[in-house]
Amino acid sequence: MNKKINTKSKNNIENSPHVPNMLNVYRNQVIASMITRFNYKNSMQVPKILSISLNMGIGDAKANSKKLESAIKEMGLITGQKPLVTKSKSDISNFKIRKGYPVGCKVTLRSTKMYEFFERLTCVALPRSRDFRGLSFKSFDGRGNYNFGIKEQIVFAEINYDDIDSVRGLNVTISTSAKTNDEAYWLLKEFGFPLREKPSKKIINEVA
């Protein structure tokens, strides 16, 4: 009992009257399945999702401020959180971009907003992608992270096609506490995340 109380006091999401569906899935299904699959000694060893980061690049953001404003607005609608403007870390002469120029926007989601976004991403947005056949199982980086791209922001129900100035893509990074690619793969898979089936041989802990 004391352990549960201490855990709740450390995590704001535990004190919220609203518990996201995906957090319930983790507690009621994922933990038990992962313990069975990997023979963990207790639930504290089971990996968890730590954060989800989204990044939208705008190549001509410096010259076209309206495009940057549109990207920021769309990212805010998609995530429910105010985006941060990303800036170039160095000069890129080929694209006439100087260090410090705005090049896009990003958002990092945690806790309740992370789980809510993960549900919309898994159940609504990705299935709406054109010719979607699942995501590659090779995009794990060996450090508990999964990276992939979405070609069109209009797959998100929050975006009205008639209101956008152009179709643009974004990159998504799901960070987990998994120590291997195999653990990270099955963690996401147990959530119902649409990863393509991997060969029976375990994913080797290599950068794809």
Image (cartoon, rainbow, N blue to C red):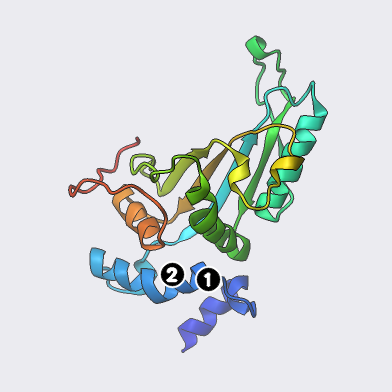
Residue sitting at 28 percent across and 49 percent down? 197
Residue sitting at 24 percent across and 65 percent down? 37
- Percent x, y of residue 161: 69, 42
- Percent x, y of residue 144: 40, 49
Which of discs 1 and 2 lies nearer the camera? The answer is 1
Q: Which mark is residue 26?
A: 2
Q: Residue furthest left?
A: 201
Camera-nearest residue between 112 and 206: 112
Residue sitting at 61 percent across and 66 percent down? 112
Residue density around tag 2, few if under 14, some if 14–19, many if 20 or more, within 10 Å:
some
Q: Is residue 50 above or below residue 73?
A: below
> What is the three-letter code of the residue carrying label 1?
Asn
Q: Is residue 164 above or below residue 185?
A: above
- Percent x, y of residue 132: 43, 43
Residue sitting at 44 percent across and 71 percent down? 25
**SS assignment at label 2:** helix
Q: Which mark is residue 58?
A: none
> What is the three-letter code of the residue carrying label 2?
Tyr
Quarter of image, res 205: top left
Left or right side of 166 for 132: left
Residue density around tag 1, few if under 14, some if 14–19, many if 20 or more, within 10 Å:
some
Left or right side of 107 for 189: left
Q: Which mark is residue 21?
A: 1
Q: Is residue 46 above or below residue 141?
A: below
Camera-nearest residue between 182 and 11: 182
Q: Residue furthest top?
A: 94
Q: CA distance from mark 1 to mark 2?
A: 9 Å
